[in-house]
Amino acid sequence: MSRVEEGRPYAWGELYAALLVLEGIAGTGRIAPVPEQQVRRTAYMPRSVFEDHLRGVGGQVFTARQKGGTVAEAAAVVFADIARLIRPERMPLHGLGQGAAEEFRQGYEARVAAYRKAWAELAGS
């Protein structure tokens, strides 16, 4: 039996967290919390949300790196994580079922917690 952490929905939740953290540190220099409702909504249509977010990644990395310091360091790590978290397989167009949506949320929360721990000074409230 595989662990939840090894599944696609969990990994997609981690990817979502990385995309949002990069967006936050590029924009405000903070790891901002995201409403639970937004995470749930994304779990039901991750592919289109990811495609939208990925269009801005290059500019976000550039902006965050220009800020220097911890923001630049975090941006480099998160950017590498994004590349690693995009699984080498096709993501379905349709959303996730209830159980998979819960795994997505768990992956999201775990990745955000790891970033907050690594860069506590960037953690927003």
Image: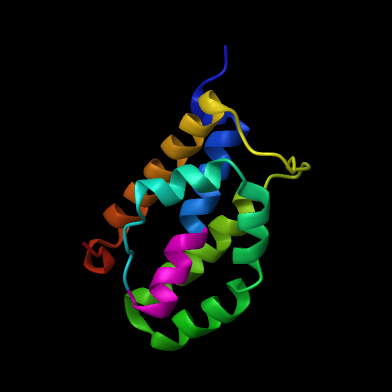
Total number of numbered labels?
Answer: 0
Residue drawn at (27%, 68%) of the image: 122
> For the C terminus, which image quadrant?
bottom left
Is 27 one of the magenta-colored residues?
yes
Quick check: is 84 in the magenta stretch? no
Residue 37 percent across, percent down from the top left = 40, 47
Instruction: Give the residues drawn in magenta, as a range.
Output: 19-29
Q: Quadrant of residue 59?
A: bottom right
Q: Nearer the viewer, residue 86 or 33?
A: 33
Q: Is residue 21 above or below residue 112?
A: below
Which residue ends up furthest to the bottom in the rendered image? 66
Q: Position of residue 99 (x, y in %)?
A: 52, 24
- Its colouring scheme is rainbow
Residue 115 x/y as whole percent: 36, 55
Q: Is residue 45 left or right of residue 101?
A: right
* Quarter occupied by residue 71: bottom left
| Front one among 119 and 97 | 97
Query: As drawn, is 97 to the left or to the right of 35?
Result: right
Secondary structure that dominates the magenta span: helix
Quarter the N terminus occupies:
top right
Residue at the image point whose x is 53% and y is 76% from the top = 61
- Quadrant housing residue 94: top right
Would residue 33 be found to the left or right of residue 83 on screen? left
**In the image, farthest residue toward the right:** 90
At which x and y percent is residue 46?
A: 61, 47
Residue at image location 52% in from the left, 33% down from the top:
101
Residue 5 drawn above or below residue 75: above
